[in-house]
Amino acid sequence: MPALFLSILLLGQWEPPMRLTRDDSASHTSFNNVHCLAAGSALHLVFYDHRTGVDQIYYMRSTDLGTTWSAETALTSGPGLKLDPSIAVAADNVHLVWEDSRSGYNSEVYYLRSTDNGLTWLPEQRLTSDNYMSRNPCVAAWGWNAYVAWASDTAGREIYFQRSVDNGATWIDYRRLTFDMQESWNPSLAAAGNVVHLAWRDWRDHGFEVYYLRSTDHGATWDTAAVRLSGDVTTGSYNPCIAAAGPACHVVWWDCRHMPFELYYRVSTDYGSTWEPEQRLTTDTTGTYNPSVAARGTDVHVAWEALYGTSFAVYKRSTDLGVTWSQDTALTMPPAYWSVSPCIATLDAGIHLVWTDFRDNEYGEIYYMRNLTGSAIRETGRREAGRAKYRPAVVRGVLFLPVPLFALHPLLLDLSGREVMSLRPGPNEVSHLAPGVYFLRGGADALPVTVVR
């Protein structure tokens, strides 16, 4: 019976920055909380660009771990601003949402999807028709489930949610998630297994604070009580960014209790049921803003912009679920000028970062960096001389999982990314499955499993 083990990779080196956009117009990454870079079997990047005289959504991808990138492809056209795109990937299914004002003053949420890893895109869908501002959309995905959250002015400014259980073909459960009658802004979504995590900034305490809510059934129902994550109501906490890997959920935000702004962090290791005390991540005295977080296994990666006269992209990492952290590492230095709005993503082959950079012109271009040896965990068939390798498992009748893997909430997926069954520690009966190749997924990693009879 196959057993799976985990191996931690050592932090490696960041490669030099690469300029991705070449048109001398305003090219911008999105707000930190919505994740405009997604990592799967390819890297998927979305941004908004003013080259046609009105902001449109553009897309690029890399199928070789960021070595080369596709041409910049416009996914929208026509009148109206298109802003702050958010992207998520599950297997070869790519989901994209953005804020769109083509219908007039009121912005709405639009959606696009690709089922072939970003090679082609299906027709767009309009998700909101509220006659009020619908803003700050974000998207997350797991298997064939896709989730979208946004802030709407329909009843004050509150957070709304919608989900799809058929890979974005149709959308259900349009619902309001906040009811405090104060301003709720900037939602950030993450998904792991059947758990959907949501964080946002909220004015219910008469000062912006970071709040959290979760669903444990793929977004069908939600906990009734929101949890406040930030601890100081006398100042303000802004723009949380959330990431999930297995049972761990990580939230970072910028906070003005120590002027100028500093970064704070909290982690839950039990699917959002309880939370560890908040931590202050930065103490640079010059100002830190717009953090982005990514996670895999026990590794947590955070990037942000820091103000040292000009603005630089800075990075730090934890390898133990946020218990301890590396020193801050400045990733952009002179002649870079105003490196802003970073977004970080991670997968088995490293850490990937994009941001808006003004070194080339006054409008801003998209830049990219990678660290190919700084990822988190790899799943292996067995240990060999302490070295991590991928090994497909061949299973006849029973798939056995060791108890330590249970913490990663493993699932069995078919080739399309659809969830076939949830797994548990110990033996799992799979003789009822049709013979073929499946994927054992724990956290965000996938191991091929061949079922035979």
Image: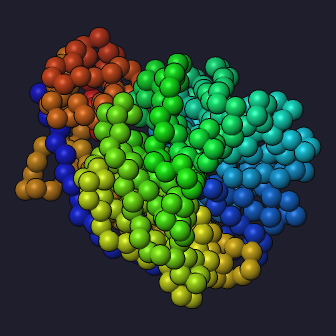
Examine the rendering and report whether any part of residue 66 can be seen.
Answer: no
386 shown above or below 202? below
**Residue 419 in the figure: left or right of residue 27:** left
Q: Quadrant of residue 216?
A: top left
Query: Quadrant location of residue 315?
Result: bottom left
- At which x and y percent is residue 208? 60, 48
Question: In percent of the image, x 74 and y 80: which residue is there?
Answer: 362
In this rendering, the answer to whether 241 lies above or below 16 is above
In the visual, does 406 lie left or right of 412?
left
**Image quarter of the N terminus:** top left
Q: Position of residue 96 (x, y in %)?
A: 64, 43
The residue lying furthest to the front in this view is 234
Look at the image and tell me in which quarter the C terminus lies. Answer: top left
When asked about the image quadrant of residue 56, the answer is bottom right
Q: Residue at x 46, y 20 (%)?
A: 217
Which residue is more in the foreground, 209 or 253?
A: 209
Among all residues in the image, which is located at the extreme left? 385
* Residue 164 position (above or below residue 120): above
Question: Whole-percent x and y of residue 329?
Answer: 39, 74
Q: Residue at x 30, y 46 (%)?
A: 297
Answer yes or no: is residue 1 visible: yes
- Where does residue 365 sit, x and y in percent of width and height? 67, 72
Q: Which residue is drawn at 78% across and 72% down?
A: 25
Q: How is the image coloured?
A: rainbow
